[in-house]
Amino acid sequence: MKLKDISPENRPLERLLTIGANSLSNAELLALIIKTGTKRNNVLNISHKILTNISIKKLSTTTITELTKIEGIGKTKAAQILSIAELSKRINYITNVNNYKIFQPKDVFDYLRYDFDCLSQEKLIVLYINPRNEVISKKIIAIGSDEQTIIPIKEIINYALKENAKGVVVTHNHPSGDPQPSTEDRYATKNLKQSLKLLDLDFVDHVIFGKNSFFSFKEKQLL
């Protein structure tokens, strides 16, 4: 069935204009983004196929190659999908850094959980904190392999001095899903703590992200 054969009140665009975007299904919203279908499948059918093969949660982390394997999706449509997914992710999870305060490990987890969502390799992010416990800057310091990210102490400290920060919160993820620190994590944390202390910078915490979980060095009294 072609989209034009569907009654107007049931077409995605007409439904959006009539009842609003928040009333549309994921497939209907996706259909509006990719706009057109093929001779064999209308745009709604293609949208359903996409969401059947790739969950909505993983849409922003999929690849052009994976999307173009789906009938009716070429490179242009795949690029449109990835662009809107990434833009949506940024809009939804941008937090005003001048207002966000860190008081406990859960605050760090809530602030960065989507930065680490569905990653296949380790990423190191450092939050720079002022004396009022407010986040003044967020820096991606390193992206490593699927096994290990090295903690570049000099780079972390240089950013802290540039931002005139009082303290730092170091975070990274374990793609395995287990947030328990490795021997290397413990060793690197110890070295960073010593370096920060020499410059009178507070080591607020080192938080490791796992799958829907985290490990806090501060919480475990390892700082």
Image (tube, grey):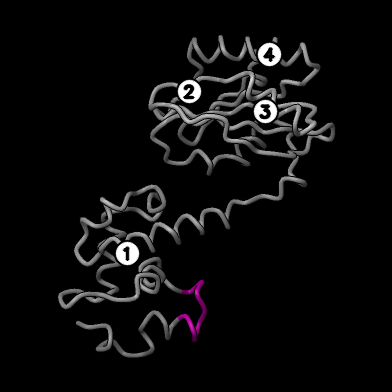
In the rendered structure, which segment of residues is drawn in magenta? Answer: 16-23
In the picture shown, does residue 61 fall above or below 82?
above
Q: Which mark is residue 21?
A: none
134 within the magenta span: no
Q: For the point 50% across and 82% down, which residue is it? A: 19
- Provide the secondary structure element on which disc 2 rests: loop
Q: Quadrant of the C terminus?
A: top right
Element type at mark 4 = helix
Residue appearing at x 77%, y 38% in the figure: 134
Q: Which residue is mark 3?
A: 169
- Choose the circle earlier in sequence order: 1 or 4: 1
Observer-side mark, 3 or 1, equals 1
Which numbered marker is on residue 76? Answer: 1
Where's residue 6, x and y in %? 28, 86
Residue with the mark numbered 2: 149
**Amino acid type at mark 2:** Thr
Q: Is residue 169 left or right of residue 171?
A: right
**Image spot of residue 214 (x, y percent):** 54, 29
Which residue bears the numbered disc 4?
Answer: 193
Q: Which badge, 1 or 2, is on the more N-terminal residue? A: 1
| Residue occupying the point 78% across, 16% down | 199
What amino acid is labelled 4 in the image?
A: Lys
